[in-house]
Amino acid sequence: MFIGAGEASGDRCGARAAEAIRRRVPDVRLLGFGGAAMRDAGVQLIADFRHLAVMGAVEAVRRLPTFLALERRTRRLWKEQGVQVFLPVDFPGLNMRLAGAARRRGMRVLYYIAPQVWAWRQRRAKKLARRCDRVLTVLPFEAPVLGDWGVDARYVGHPLLDEVGRSDSPRAKEPDAVAGPERARPRGETLGIFPGSRAQEVGRILPVFADAARHLQGTHPGVRCVVARAPHLPGSLFAGCGLPLASTGEVIAQATAALTKSGTITLELALARIPMVVGYAMSPLEWGVVRSMVKVDAVALPNLLAGREVIPELLQGRLTPSAAAAAVAPLLDRDSPRRRQMVEDLGEVAGRLGGPGCADRVAAHCEEFLA
């Protein structure tokens, strides 16, 4: 069996799935591309995701030779090793191409963490139906939408719920990412800053978030601002921000409120009931392409799950240091009505995700296809 994960969140999900698959099928051989979490879970890796993660269409074009080389290597490995089942984990830019190649070889394909075709166009869903035997979704509204478009889609719950309270979770095992004159530690109210796990997005978003932190500290001098650093990212990316760093898990544990990029991290914060403001930006060209194709109004997962705006989104030109500081300031006041309402709304969002057991359900589908 081959598992393909191209970024940090997929690596964690792939690792938990691999562990659960081994419990059900002890003699299975697991190959793939991913990161340290998957390697620790017993997956034999042919490539590290740190060389794969990209942000936006322009960067994807620049990295195309890397993707094509990995695609060729993967297909060659499938042939040499007689791989039966492909479990792509998110990362649709490469994994959708590989899914098509796998189906042409007669392999079974279970796509774990569905590409967000529901946000784009129906023709993408039809492509998903052609290239995958089954799609395992992690958001409750995805399976019915995909089913209407001819995709065999099954809701398996969200993998984050398998991590809550686990001391052996990949998040809990992250090394401390300390920088600056002192270790980040709680003292009064703390703003957690989450600029992402991909170098390209950190390079674009962190300078704005750091400036917002300085704006905020100018009007709220008692607030500490701490930046979450993904363990695989080089320290040079964060050198100019002038703020203390810590692991993502540490920052979540300390944060009173958060300034964050979009993505899975927003659900982690929702589960922890941490009020947040989402900010995101890409190049004008990429933004123009996205806006011409995207069918939904929101990008933050808590807003999509709630069906309304629960947390503010500052996108593109709206993402400025002053706007971000103004939006997050009331969330640091534990007595503010705005904060209390958001905490209540995030509890509703968390409840819609269901309970733990996602990895075991993924493994059950894999066992069926390996039989």
Image: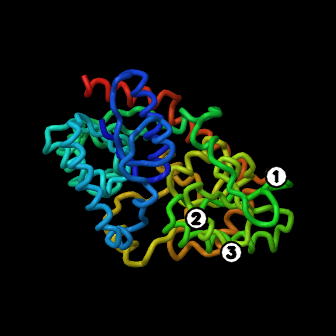
**In the rendered image, which residue does mark 1 sit on?**
186
Residue drawn at point x = 53 percent, y = 58 percent: 197
Callout 3 secondary element: helix
- Residue at screen point 70% across, 69% down: 326
- Residue at mark 3: 211
Q: Answer few, some or many: residues within 10 Å of disc 1's Cα (few below 14, many 20 plus, some between 14 and 19).
A: some
Question: Which residue: 38% across, 33% down?
Answer: 155
Along the horizontal axis of the image, is 63 left or right of 254?
Answer: left
On the image, the x and y values in percent for residue 370 come to: 26, 26
Q: Amino acid at mark 1?
A: Pro
Percent across and percent down for residue 210 are 67, 71
Q: Amino acid at mark 3?
A: Asp
Left or right of residue 369: residue 140: right
Where is 358 relative to 231, above or below?
Answer: above
Contact between marks 3 and 1 (CB within 8 A): the answer is no
Q: Amino acid at mark 2?
A: Pro
Do we see residue 106 in this rendering? Answer: yes
> At which x and y percent is residue 342?
66, 49
Q: Quadrant of the C terminus?
A: top left
Q: Of marks 2 and 1, which one's residue comes earlier in the chain? A: 1
Determine which of the numbered discs, if any, sits on residue 234 in the image: 2
N-term-proximal mark, 2 vs 3: 3
Q: CA distance from mark 2 to mark 3?
A: 21 Å
The mark nearer the N terminus, 3 or 1, is 1
